[in-house]
Image (spheres, grey):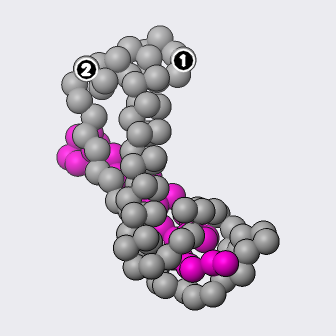
Amino acid sequence: MISTTTNSIEGKRVLEYKGIVFGEVVSGINVIKDFAAGLTNFFGGRSKSYEGELIEARENALREMEKRALSIGANAVVGVKIDYEVLGAQGDMLMVTASGTAVLVA
């Protein structure tokens, strides 16, 4: 499966547009990660716990989007966009959405 942020794939020809596909992941940040991130915020530096959560959520959203593209007969996704949102009353939930146009290429 090819996924790209561009609207075309070099060397490939779009045979059919299958439609827009999405992959959504909502992930909770647990108390330990939140505590560790709070220490990083206080002392400065990068929050490895939050970075890891972001990376995992993004990869899962992309995989989910690709899985949905495959299910409708596509072999690529073009124009991929990734959005991040913070949810929940305490801001303790992370939503990552990957979206793009599923296409059949040759």
For residue 7, what is the image quadrant? Answer: bottom right
Q: Which of the pair 25/31 is nearer the observer?
A: 25
Image vertical order of residue 56 relative to residue 87, above or below: above
Residue occupying the far top of the picture: 43
User: Residue 23: horizontal and vertical position, in percent?
Assistant: 38, 62
Query: Which element type, helix, strand or loop, lies under badge 1?
Result: loop
Q: Which of the pair 36/41 is nearer the observer?
A: 36
Q: Tell me the residue that label 2 is attached to.
A: 32
Image vertical order of residue 88 relative to residue 44, above or below: below
Query: In this rendering, does residue 86 appear at all?
Result: no
Q: Is residue 41 magenta?
A: no
The residue sitting at 37% across, 73% down in the picture is 71
Region of the chain picked out in magenta, as a range: 77-106
The mark found on residue 29 in the picture is none
Q: From mark 1 to mark 2, how far is it between C-alphas?
A: 17 Å
The residue sitting at 47% across, 31% down in the picture is 51
For residue 105, what is the image quadrant? Answer: bottom right
The residue sitting at 23% across, 29% down in the picture is 30
Q: Which of the pair 47/97 is nearer the observer?
A: 97
Say left or right for 70 vs 94. Answer: right
